[in-house]
Image (cartoon, rainbow, N blue to C red):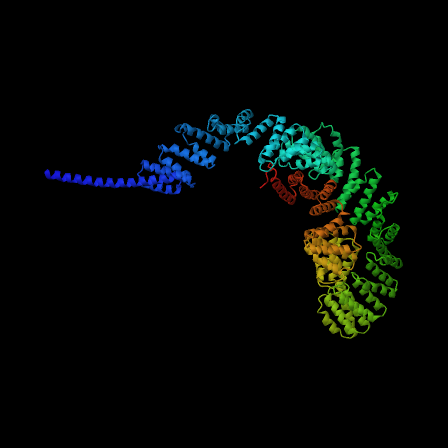
Amino acid sequence: MQFRFVKNHFLSSLLFLTVFAVFSQQSIVDANVTANYNNALNLYNNKAYAAAQKIFKTVEEKTKINSALKVDASYYNAICAIKLNQTNADKKVLTFVEENPTSSKKNKIYFIVGKYYFANKKASHALKWFKKVNKDLLSAENQKELNFKMGYGLLVTKNLILAKNRFLPLINDAKYGNDARYYFGFISYKLEDYGIAESTLKEIADNESYKAEITYYLLDISFKAGKFERCIKVGKELLKTVRKKDAPEISKIVGESYFNQKKYKEAIPYLKAYTGKKGKWNNYDYYQLGYVYFMQNDFGNAISYFNKIIDQKNSVSQNAYYHLAECYLNTDKKTEALNAFKTASEMDFNLEIQEDAALNYAKLSYETGNPFQNISDILQNFLKKYPKSPSYKEINNLVVSSFIHQQNYQGALDYLNKQKTTDNFALASEVSLYRGIQLFNETKLQVALSYFTKSKQSLDKKINTKGGYWEAETLYRLKNYKEAISKFKNVKKKLKTNIKEFSLIDYHIGYCHFKLKEYNKAITAFKKLLKVNLTPNEVQDDVFIRLGDSYFATRNYGEAIKSYQTVVTNLGSGADYAQYQIGMSHGFRNENDSKIRALSKVVNDFQISSLKDDALYQLANTYTKTKNHEKAHRAYNRLLEKYPKSSFLPRALVRQGLLYYSNNQNPEAIERFKLTASKYPNTPDAIEAVRNAKNIYLDEDNFDEYVAWVQTLQFINVSQSEAENSSFTIAERKYFENKNHSGIIFSLKKYLTKFPKGPNFLKANYYLANILFKEKQFDKAIVNYNIILKAGITPFSEDTLAKLSQIYLEKQKFQDALPLLERLEKEAYTIENIQFAQSNLMKGYYETQAYIAAISYAKKVLSMSSVKNTLEQDAITIIARSAFKTEDFVMAEEYYTELEKNAIGALKAETLYYNAFFKNQQKEYIASNKVVQKLIADYSTYKYWGVKSYVIMAKNYYSLKDAYQATFILENVIKNFTQFKDLINEAQLELNRVKENEAKTNNSIIPKN
């Protein structure tokens, strides 16, 4: 036991020593941590937050959980994070609270963090922390501080009622009283509790810290209370001493006080001195200045302010637009007034203004035109909406007139047909005439015809006669010549005096007879016409040529020569043709020397003429006839060398071969005949060449060589020639009888099937194609025409090229038509076909967007002195459009200006648009707008051009600093014309630009992003 006791005692002693050592060691550690903590606290108090935080973190890590020192270190670590603006500062505070929910420092840290953010001008963020503070744990002084700073945080976050309640207990406090009273009064002012605001703010009105602000608030409160005289008196005094930045707001109050007293002149300088919120006015600011100028009849200045009001619909806007319209009327800007009245009429804040604006909108639409709505619809809508209007009868009378004023003749007819009366029936006949002319000018001839027929029902002789004339003119254009003659003659019977509109009736009658090959009747008509004083620029040259052609066709060559010579002497249109016909006329009179002289002039005197190859061919033949073989050969050779694509080449080769044969130059003759057969197979000339060669071979007793040669020719079959000839003769006879088209087609197809390579192969294809063309079986005709063209230059080439290209043109297949037209231009004999080729090349190139080529051919067309007015206009149109497409605006303007002189209908509308466009480009904005107004007033039927020109007008107005007109127009384009997507896109882009610019100075405008 003794031993055990000793042993146990030893163990106890050992345990004591161990515990003592550990305890001593822990005490040393705690002492070091405490020293570090105190060091960190010292750094913290000296605002060395970064260094302090580092040590606080170390202390926090080395201290036991739940120890007071660890809690304090964690607390100061979070506070340092706040002081150092660390991103995780808020999180550290919340973590401290979560880990130490019962700590007495929880409330303190909330309060300290809130104060820190407040001191750093982050009142809204401070408010978040102040709301976590339990005020009951704060001292009385800290509670006041909390209330004040929370009140301010609530104020800046616009929680005005809550803020007001925080400031209320402090308004008599020695420390916070003045500030709390100011904010309490300010909040009352903002809450429109003006009585409380005024009484509160007056108590500290002399406080230098708030004197400037309080002075303004008290002045504004007086203004809102209607104490305008006081506002003026006080405000004007304040302006003498007030800070520069406060002057605009005080000026505004003085200006508005004068405004409310209707002292408009006095209001102006003060209203203008206002600079707006953040440098921007709003719509009401612009309205006030516009109105004061309006009330002094200073309409120009009034407009400049009213027209800034855009992008809002309220009573101010309605009043502004109504007065703006009145200003425009007083400055004779009716189109602008129309737009402003329309806008005012679409708002119902003041019903009296709305009705009067609608009435003025209707009247001005009738007077000036309206591109956005049919005028008749506007007038009828007014009648429906205001059936008791004192102006009802006046507007009702304008409905029909509006259709005619707009040139909406179809609309007028539809309306008249619904409102059937005797007066309306008579009016419908007259309007039918106008509608017919409109369709005629749009080349819708068949449709126009029915309207002219209806117009002849008129009891008005003038309308009746005009209807008859235009009916005849339409039949003439439709190539119904017999009926046209009858109608023209009926018109002549009704005419008692010569009327300029009908001065060319005899020309049309003569031309119809000419086309019907009634040449003697044509002569009579043309001679009558020549008794009228025609200018060379009209149809005189053409009349002399047609008169000459008529004499020529009746073999009265002497008179023909006289007519042709007139054109040649005057160097008139078609002089080369007239010179050629003089030569041919001499030939038929066996005056060969005269013929040679005349044809030589065609070859030598005309620099450009499509008849030179014709003249050379005839010269060669005439030299042959007069036994002047050397000159004949020279003429044939010149033709063959200079004009390798002439349709006369196969005939010239045969004629020259015969000339060689007659002079016993058989080898040369055989060479010409063989050349004809090889280059122009399946042509009548080739067949004649083979026949002539056969005669030479027979003369030389060399028939075997002939047979050997002929066997190389696919179009000659010696054994079948008689059968072939008989078959073709039958088909050809039917073709010329022209009685049964289906029978002709059958016979020609039968021949071509039986003799696919016969000598009349080309002629049969030509006849068949022509019949199919007449029957409008165009796809079948194309096949046969192409067979002819593959054979090269033949007697059928020119007509084939003309008809085949016509088919492709009617099918809108310009790519197929263009190469044919190019060939026709080079190979054509007749003036008509050359003109046809060049005019359609001009159109084809334009349609295929080959604008440079289109311009080139249009200029060729214009260089023709015989060009008809319609074709001349087409050429000018294509040059103008093509030049614009290629951005050659100088040329485009030149030709559009020329075109505008005589254009009508849609084309006139187009020219007016470009007139306005070019004036806009040249910054002639007012002149540009006048052109647009003319377009809208006179050509509103042509909507596309009207709308397109309105976009130009909007740009003009904006350049003239009239933002209202610009936005009104653009918004209405976008709203009303969804069918024109290209114009809507253009208008939207321009509208965005306008609003973006205006928003820089008007805070009522919200630009579209």
How many discs appear?
0
Is the residue 712 above or below the residue 401 in the image?
Answer: below
Q: Is residue 745 visible?
A: no
**Residue 773 position by quadrant:** bottom right
- Foreground pick, 671 / 253: 253
- In the rendered image, residue 553, in percent from the top left (x then y), is placed at 85, 57
- In the rendered image, residue 125, in percent from the top left (x then y), is placed at 46, 36
Image quarter of the C terminus:
top right
Farthest residue in the bottom direction?
701
- Foreground pick, 37 / 3: 37
**Residue 29 position by quadrant:** top left
Is the residue 547 above or below the residue 151 in the image?
Answer: below
- In the rendered image, residue 221, in percent from the top left (x then y), is placed at 58, 27
Left or right, residue 213 beside residue 768: left
Image quarter of the N terminus:
top left
Q: Is residue 526 visible?
A: yes
- In the rendered image, residue 254, in percent from the top left (x then y), is placed at 62, 30
Is the residue 854 above or below the residue 108 in the image?
Answer: below
- Foreground pick, 833 / 209: 209
Left or right, residue 65 beside residue 798: left
- Foreground pick, 923 / 837: 923
Farthest residue in the left direction?
2
Q: Residue at x 79, y 42 (%)?
A: 452
